[in-house]
Image (tube, grey):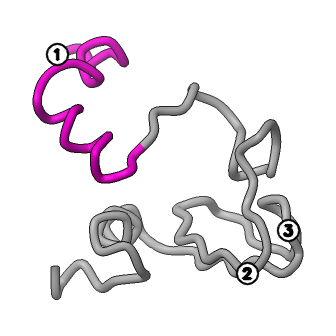
Amino acid sequence: MRPPTKRATTAGFVAKGLREAGFEWRAAGCSLCLGMNPDRLEGRQICASSSNRNFKGRMGCKEAEVYLASPETVAASAVAGCVADPREA
């Protein structure tokens, strides 16, 4: 089975609900994880990342807080709007 394409995942009622909740689709590749392009943390923003590296300024701002987490924790945090435990979601 092939993974869904961007076109398939950005159409329909699920995508509409995600956009209304504030989600954004980004291009594949290094972006926020390296603080590249306009995808950067600013100020004291907090990010839960499933990346394998964490150091000050990696995601664009030395004042931002980056927490390394499992993909499950990152997904639960995205839904909750704050760092969250997926076992309690």
Quadrant of the image for the N terminus? top left
Position of residue 61 relative to residue 30, above or below, is below
Tell me where the magenta segment starts and ends, as one range.
Answer: 1-23
Residue at the front extreme of this rendering: 20
Estimate the x, y position of residue 47 in percent, counting from the top left: 58, 71
Magenta span includes 19: yes
Please report the residue visible at 61 percent of the width from the left and 77 percent of the height from the top: 46
Q: Nearer the viewer, residue 2 or 30?
A: 30
Magenta span includes 17: yes
Q: CA distance from mark 2 to mark 3?
A: 8 Å
Kind of residue at badge 2: Arg
Q: Which residue is mark 2?
A: 44
Q: CA distance from mark 1 to mark 3?
A: 39 Å
Please report the residue visible at 32 percent of the width from the left and 40 percent of the height from the top: 19
Estimate the x, y position of residue 68 in percent, counting from the top left: 58, 74
For marks 1 and 3 on the same chain, the one whose residue lies earlier in the sequence: 1
Q: Is residue 66 left or right of residue 84?
A: right
Name the image quarter holding residue 77: bottom left
Q: Is residue 33 left or right of residue 80?
A: right
Q: Which residue is mark 3?
A: 61
Q: Which mark is residue 1?
A: 1
